[in-house]
Image: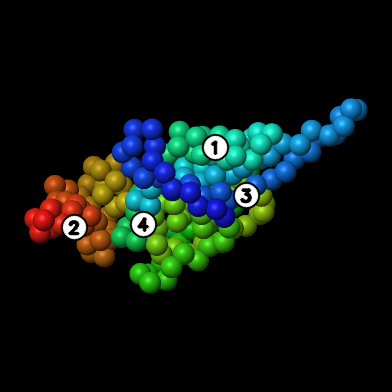
Amino acid sequence: MTAFSGRNQLGEQALEEKLVSLNRVQKVHRGGRTLRWNALVVVGDGAGSVGVGLGKSAEVPIAIRKGAEEAKKGLTKVSMLGSTIPHPVESRYGAARVLLKPASPGTGVIAGGAVRAVVEAAGIKDVLSKSMGSSNPVNIARAALEGLKSLRTVREVAATRGRAPEDIADRYHLDLLPSEGQPSEEEQEEELAEETE
């Protein structure tokens, strides 16, 4: 996996690009062979946004660029609970199945290949995973992304049900989430940095 870092067109956030797989495809014609490349690219800001793209071209750099552009178009916000995910989730894409489970702080990312690239790009630091079924990295990456899209925090579920978060979750889940109206840990750190300057 190769990592690139850059900014999107607006220059708002630094996005890190990871090349997950590069696949050579040959098509045999009567007059010879046509060589093309497929590049699977994962893009994320490390703070809860992630996207997956597949670029195809006759040249490797163009395929990577196309994959990164597609991934940026499909950036998705991921619900997180501290440095892990709020609940276990199993997702499918084609014949690929991916299981993601929350892990205690300090566990690290227990994942391989495409799942690791997607989870790290999203900024998740502690997670357990298992990929089952197809070993195709394109389908595995997209299954992992579908799983991350389907995650919901306690507050999101409570808002959907029209109930208070305290009614449907234990204290642990509520302590790790910034309460409504209060700044998150990152915002508090930024304020402290501004005050000290």
Q: Which residue is mark 1?
A: 65
Q: Residue at x 34, y 51 (%)?
A: 47
- Which sits earlier in the primary sequence, circle 1 or circle 2? 1
Callout 2 amino acid: Glu
- Distance from Cα at disc 3 to Cα at disc 4: 29 Å
Q: Residue at x 38, y 52 (%)?
A: 46
Residue contact at pointers 3 and 2, CB within 8 angstroms: no
Q: Which residue is mark 3?
A: 21
Q: Secondary structure at mark 2?
A: helix
Residue contact at pointers 3 and 4, CB within 8 angstroms: no
Q: Which residue is mark 4?
A: 86
Q: Position of residue 34 (x, y in %)?
A: 79, 33
Crowding near the residue tagged with mark 4, few <14, some 14–19, many ≥20 C-alpha atoms within 10 Å = some
Q: Which residue is mark 2?
A: 189
- Distance from Cα at disc 4 to Cα at disc 1: 33 Å
Crowding near the residue tagged with mark 2, few <14, some 14–19, many ≥20 C-alpha atoms within 10 Å = few
Callout 1 amino acid: Arg
Crowding near the residue tagged with mark 3, few <14, some 14–19, many ≥20 C-alpha atoms within 10 Å = some
- Which sits earlier in the primary sequence, circle 3 or circle 4? 3
Which labelled disc corresponds to residue 170?
none
